[in-house]
Each structure stands twice: as structure tokens, then as C-alpha cells.
Amino acid sequence: MSDANDGIVRVGESFGIGNEFTGVRVRKVWTRQGERLELSVPRRGYRILLDAMQLEIVAAQEPEKFSELFARKLGSEDE
């Protein structure tokens, strides 16, 4: 996906976080609408830009909520 499509005007250095199951690249980007955190999973082609409000919502979640999301994404729970 092209940065121009997201209005990205500047990017910071990226770094990776990984384990035996996956790897994620993280970097701060600046768009015409403000700062965002870009998360990408190159192996799967996933990518998302999150602003401060969205990150606050993620940070406020209980760990159990992520377990529910994992179960749904992996198909081990009826939707």
C-alpha cells in the first residue's frame, strides 16, 4: 500500500517486535491529519494506522478482550 494513499508526509524509523508465531513492524508516521502509529505485518500484508485516541482505547482493554479477538480471528469461536 502506498504511503501517498494515507496522506503520509514523513516517517520515523521502524522497529520490529516478534516471536515464534509472528512479526510486526512499528513506526511513527506524520500525516496531514496528525501523528499516527503504523503497525504492519509484512508476511501477511496487514497494515493499520492508529491515532492517539485509538491507541488509548487499545491500552484501556483488559487482556481477556484480546483473547476473545484471537479466538474469533482464528475461528475457534462461533461468531
Image (cartoon, rainbow, N blue to C red):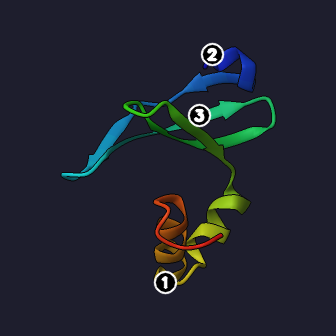
**Picture quarter with the N terminus:** top right
- Which mark's residue is nearer the viewer, 2 or 1? 1
74 and 52: which one is in front? Answer: 74
Q: Which residue is mark 3?
A: 29
* Disc nearest the viewer among 3 and 2: 2
List the residue tagged with mark 1. Answer: 64
**Label 3 CA crowd tier, 10 Å (few <14, some 14–19, many 20+):** many
Q: Are marks 3 and 1 in contact (CB under 8 Å)?
A: no
Residue type of the residue flagged with mark 2:
Ser
Nearest to N terminus: mark 3 or mark 2: 2
Total of numbered circles in the picture?
A: 3
Q: Earlier in the sequence, mark 2 or mark 1?
A: 2
Image quadrant in which the C terminus is located: bottom right
Q: Position of residue 53 (x, y in %)?
A: 73, 61
Q: Residue drawn 54% across and 26% down?
A: 11
Name the kind of residue labelled 1 in the image. Answer: Glu
- Element carrying mark 1: helix
Q: How far apart are labels 3 and 2 at the CA level?
A: 13 Å
> What is the spatial separation of the Cα atoms under label 3 and label 1, in whole angstroms?
29 Å
> What is the quadrant of residue 55 in the picture?
bottom right
